[in-house]
Image (cartoon, coloured by chain):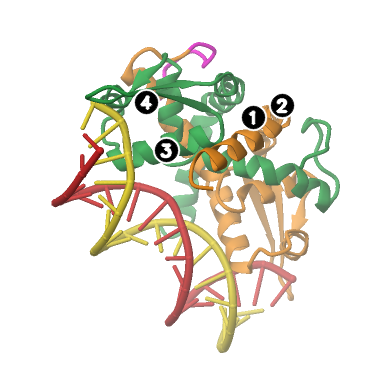
Chain colours: A green, B orange, C yellow, D red
Amino acid sequence: MATLGTLTKPPKTYEECTSVAVPMIEMLGRISGRWSLYVIMALMQGPQRFSQLRRQLQGISQKMLTQTLRELEEDGIVHRTVTPIIPPRVDYELTAMGRELQDPLAAIHAWTLRNGREVAEARARYAVAHGK
Amino acid sequence: MATLGTLTKPPKTYEECTSVAVPMIEMLGRISGRWSLYVIMALMQGPQRFSQLRRQLQGISQKMLTQTLRELEEDGIVHRTVTPIIPPRVDYELTAMGRELQDPLAAIHAWTLRNGREVAEARARYAVAHGK
DNA sequence: CAGGATCCTGATTGATACTG
DNA sequence: CAGTATCAATCAGGATCCTG
């Protein structure tokens, strides 16, 4: 899809812009699901079972946990191991690719640390400038 | 909110995990809106007027362009300059904070370049392993 | 234990028409 | 030109109940 170099310089054409953006947007779409980031960060602590994750991510419904894990598994970010015993046991862990997400996440984290305050200020300014 | 160091090591506790993740998720939520990334990348080419943006981002409705720009403005990522003439002229450009997004975006971009193929393969495997 | 299947609701998106 | 307003459609998320 993207046949480009890096994003260290702005894209110059519409085609270039979209060819860069499309896979990134797919990517962002996945990791910015309501719960994906929580799940990924929880799994950065190490492999975990379904109910461990659910306890840790207080507030997540079992449906959304299942769904989030399935999507991440589908993308090869999470690996799922089923042990066919009774009661069933299923373990989840990050794949190598999933662990490599630490770089992008760290970059976003750094941005939020640097600019979090300014975003808050900008929102406050916007609120007063416009209707409350 | 986040009082942590960096994300270079996995979060260890639930509180730590969420205190890191919450502002990041807000952040991701914004830049992963259906159109936000396109708009940001378009503006990385330099300041542009509303209709320039609209022509460039083929397929975006004028409603969504307006809305996306407003959100980015609210967060202080985009600056909006109104010239009160007839017909009206409005220019948009990235703020310094917006330009700093290049680092996180480059990191994500690098990830998609490194792993795009493997994601595609993972999806294909998942498709055959499960119901088509 | 680890889900699958339903149903429901609010938010997101888009198409269309109108305006200063 | 650069929007606002309105309505219709889609969708993601959640609550609930059921099962191997």
Q: From the viewer's perspective, is the residue at label 2 or at label 4 nearer?
A: 2
Percent across and percent down for residue A83 are 35, 21
CA gap, disc 4 to disc 1? 20 Å
Which disc number belongs to residue A115?
A: none
CA gap, disc 4 to disc 3? 17 Å
Percent across and percent down for residue B80 are 65, 54
Which disc number belongs to residue B104?
A: 1
Q: Is residue A33 left or right of residue C20?
A: left
Q: Residue at x 72, y 63 (%)?
A: B54
Total numbered circles: 4
| Quarter that holds the N terminus of chain A | top right
Percent across and percent down for residue A107 are 60, 24
The part of the image, by quadrant, that contains residue A34 is top left
Percent across and percent down for residue B75 are 53, 44
Name the residue that disc number 4 marks.
B18
Under mark 1, the amino acid is Pro
Q: Is residue B2 magenta?
A: yes
Mark 2: few, some, or many residues within 10 Å (few <14, many ≥20)? few
Tell me which label, 4 or 1, sits earlier in the chain: 4
Which disc number belongs to residue A68?
A: 3
